[in-house]
Image: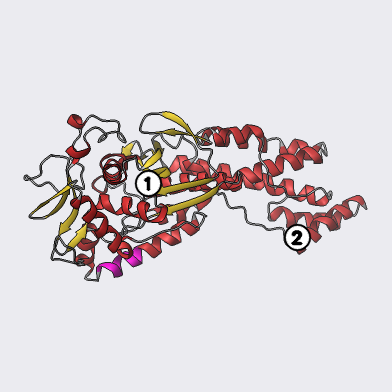
């Protein structure tokens, strides 16, 4: 498996049998937007493919359930912070289920506070952090030779991240909060005072805890590359003397009608609304139209095309299965062609996989017409397994009654009882399986 390391654009080879993956999860203060789900869908495909290739995958996807945004929203809603974050976390879990995401570990930040505090204490005691009136800050000058490696930037060109609170007393403009001294909302006691952890410390601590080492692959949206991932890596380098991840994967922005998603522009699309309107298969298929690392433009026309395309593909697959069953040729086998295998293994070349699936499904009608059942079976198993690796759900409508109807229809045709055969055929046709 080869993956482009986004920190240097070099393809790294993943050849370990045990692969550790960490993907940054959402801050659950609201329903996730459609851009939030592109990364987890992408990494779900990676997860599925690695399992198919018999890798052992340890996948962690955090949930940030304490945050200033959560506190602000909870005050608006006049509810407890954890009550609010628990609600939206459950809503996120529903989305993951609807999107057919494989089960992964999803630790909550609030349930790992002792580890976070101890990690900050260690950074402070070893001289990598300092205290100001509003909290504890990481001193990036202590690792200046490696700071900027994840984002591939020079320190002098870096700008303060949007989520970093600016304090004029910081030693360096890009120093970031490890612990925020707070007296409002949910707080925890620490040697530095009551407060909450900084955002950048949460993920690195969870990696340190759940993997007890660096990870093979660390990913998320491209917007997390700096400052979040850069600052995670800085802390790990300081304490563990090595990079946090061997390979960084960053998923490109999702644009809305060629504009960046923004509430102020009125183009902020909630994921659950898009899934309810178009279906999870259409959403996933739409995401695969562009390279995962590149921007992808969302329009109603584009996702409608994706829905029509995947619906047609599934319809053709059901038709193929019907005729394979009729002719006693249906033997399900999990396998993909070498061509598709190579595309998966070469940095998840999903757009080219989509093209091949589209091309291959167009052959189904001709194979049925020429009664080429062996080739049809190979094609079916190839496409079906590919769709499964892409997380596309194909509902199994081939109940015993349906199978009996297929067999009866075929027999009636052979007996030239066309009137009765047409009655059954019309019912099967309505199910879109012939």
Highlighted magenta segment, given as a residue range: 81-88
Relative horizontal placement of residue 358, taking residue 265 as reference (left or right): right
Please say if 238 is above or below 11: below
Q: Earlier in the sequence, mark 1 or mark 2?
A: 1
Residue furthest front in the image: 126
The residue at 83%/39% (across/down) is 371
* Image mark for residue 230: none
| Residue 156 image position (x, y, % from top left) | 17, 30
Reading the image, the residue beneath label 2 is: 402
Task: Name the residue nearer the viewer: 253 or 82.
Answer: 82
Q: Is residue 25 visible?
A: no
Relative horizontal placement of residue 283, taking residue 342 as reference (left or right): left
Relative horizontal placement of residue 354, taking residue 365 as reference (left or right): left
Predominant SS of the magenta segment = helix
Element under label 2? helix
The residue at 34%/40% (across/down) is 242
For the N terminus, which image quadrant? top right
The residue at 74%/58% (across/down) is 427
């Amino acid at each position: 498996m080869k993956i482009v390391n986004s920190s240097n654009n070099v393809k790294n080879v993943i050849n370990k049998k045990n692969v550790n993956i960490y993907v940054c999860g959402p801050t659950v203060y609201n329903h996730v937007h459609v851009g939030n789900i592109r990364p987890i869908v992408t990494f779900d495909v990676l997860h599925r493919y690695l399992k198919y290739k018999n890798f052992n995958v340890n996948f962690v996807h955090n949930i940030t359930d304490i945050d200033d945004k959560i506190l602000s929203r909870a005050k608006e809603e006049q509810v407890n912070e954890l009550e609010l974050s628990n609600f939206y976390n459950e809503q996120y879990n529903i989305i993951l289920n609807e999107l057919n995401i494989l089960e992964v570990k999803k630790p909550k930040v609030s349930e790992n506070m002792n580890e976070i505090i101890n990690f900050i204490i260690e950074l402070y005691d070893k001289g990598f952090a300092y205290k100001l009136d509003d909290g504890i800050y990481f001193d990036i000058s202590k690792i200046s030779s490696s700071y900027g490696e994840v984002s591939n930037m020079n320190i002098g060109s870096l700008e303060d991240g949007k989520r970093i609170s600016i304090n004029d007393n910081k030693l360096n403009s890009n120093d970031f909060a490890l612990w925020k001294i707070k007296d409002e909302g949910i707080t925890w006691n620490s040697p530095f005072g009551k407060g909450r952890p900084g955002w950048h410390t949460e993920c690195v601590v969870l990696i340190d805890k759940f993997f007890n080492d660096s990870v093979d692959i660390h990913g998320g949206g491209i917007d997390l590359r700096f400052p979040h991932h850069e600052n995670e890596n800085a802390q790990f380098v300081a304490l563990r003397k090595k990079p946090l991840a061997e390979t960084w994967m960053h998923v490109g922005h999702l644009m809305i009608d060629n504009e960046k998603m923004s509430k102020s522009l009125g183009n902020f699309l909630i994921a659950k609304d898009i899934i309810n309107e178009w279906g999870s298969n259409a959403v996933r298929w739409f995401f695969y139209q562009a390279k995962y690392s590149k921007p992808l433009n969302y329009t109603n026309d584009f996702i409608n095309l994706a829905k029509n395309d995947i619906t047609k593909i599934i319809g053709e697959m059901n038709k193929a299965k019907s005729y394979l069953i009729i002719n006693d040729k249906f033997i399900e086998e999990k396998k993909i062609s070498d061509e598709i295998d190579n595309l998966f293994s070469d940095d998840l070349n999903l757009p080219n996989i989509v093209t091949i699936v589209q091309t291959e499904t167009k052959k189904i009608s001709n194979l049925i017409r020429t009664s080429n059942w062996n080739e049809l079976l190979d094609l079916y198993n190839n496409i079906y397994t590919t769709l499964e690796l892409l997380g596309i759900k194909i509902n199994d409508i081939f109940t015993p009654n349906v199978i009996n109807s297929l067999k009866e229809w075929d027999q009636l045709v052979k007996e030239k009882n066309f009137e009765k055969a047409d009655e059954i055929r019309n019912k099967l046709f309505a199910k879109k399986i012939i």
